[in-house]
Image (spheres, grey):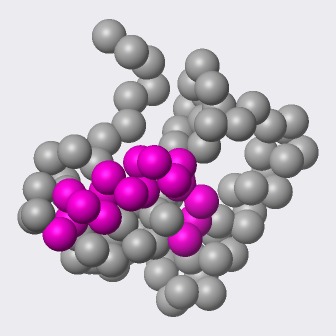
Amino acid sequence: MTVIKLDIDYKMSKQLLKEFIETRLGLLALMNYHVEDYNYAKTKHGYHFWFKITEQLTEQRLAEVQFLLGDDIRRARFNFMRAKMNVFNEFNILFSRKK
């Protein structure tokens, strides 16, 4: 099981949010991943999304899939570096609310 995390810094209408989720689910299916569950939370700048898939991905592949699904480009760049250094999972976090 792997949790795919996306940070989208854009405030969407309800319709666009619905379409965004549907297209992410479609892309995951196209990549032959099986979604068990998903969730999202509104943030100050947009949304955080979590897609739980049954497959176990390597750190590098998880960084790639998050990028392909539209994760924030700055976050994706750091995640690629973290995966290369084998510290990806310690830093691949999203917060629904700042503490």
| Residue 66 included in the magenta stretch of the image | no
Instruction: Residue at 45%, 26% (x, y): give it.
Output: 96
Using the image as rendered, state which of residue 16 and residue 80 is in the foreground.
80
Residue 74 in the image, given as x and y percentages of width and height: 45, 48
Q: Is residue 93 left or right of residue 5?
A: left
Residue 68 in the image, given as x and y percentages of width and height: 55, 71
Instruction: Residue at 20%, 58% (x, y): give it.
Output: 82
Q: Is residue 44 left or right of residue 81?
A: right
Using the image as rendered, state which of residue 53 and residue 57 is in the foreground.
57
Residue 65 in the image, given as x and y percentages of width and height: 45, 72
Q: Is residue 49 visible?
A: no
Using the image as rendered, state which of residue 73 and residue 45 is in the foreground.
73
Q: Residue furthest top?
A: 99
Magenta residues, as a range?
A: 68-84
Residue 19, quarter of the rendered image: bottom right
Q: Residue furthest left?
A: 86
Image quarter (top left, top right, bottom left or bottom right) of the N terminus: bottom left
Position above or below: 2 against 5? below
Q: Is residue 6 left or right of residue 83?
A: right
Residue 83, quarter of the rendered image: bottom left
Instruction: Residue at 46%, 63% (x, y): give it.
Output: 66
Image quarter (top left, top right, bottom left or bottom right) of the C terminus: top left
Residue 5 in the image, given as x and y percentages of width and height: 43, 52
Position above or below: 27 against 99? below
Q: Is residue 59 visible?
A: yes
Q: Is residue 76 left or right of residue 92?
A: right
Q: How many marks?
A: 0
Using the image as rendered, state which of residue 84 and residue 42 is in the foreground.
84
Q: What predominant SS class does the magenta segment belong to?
A: helix
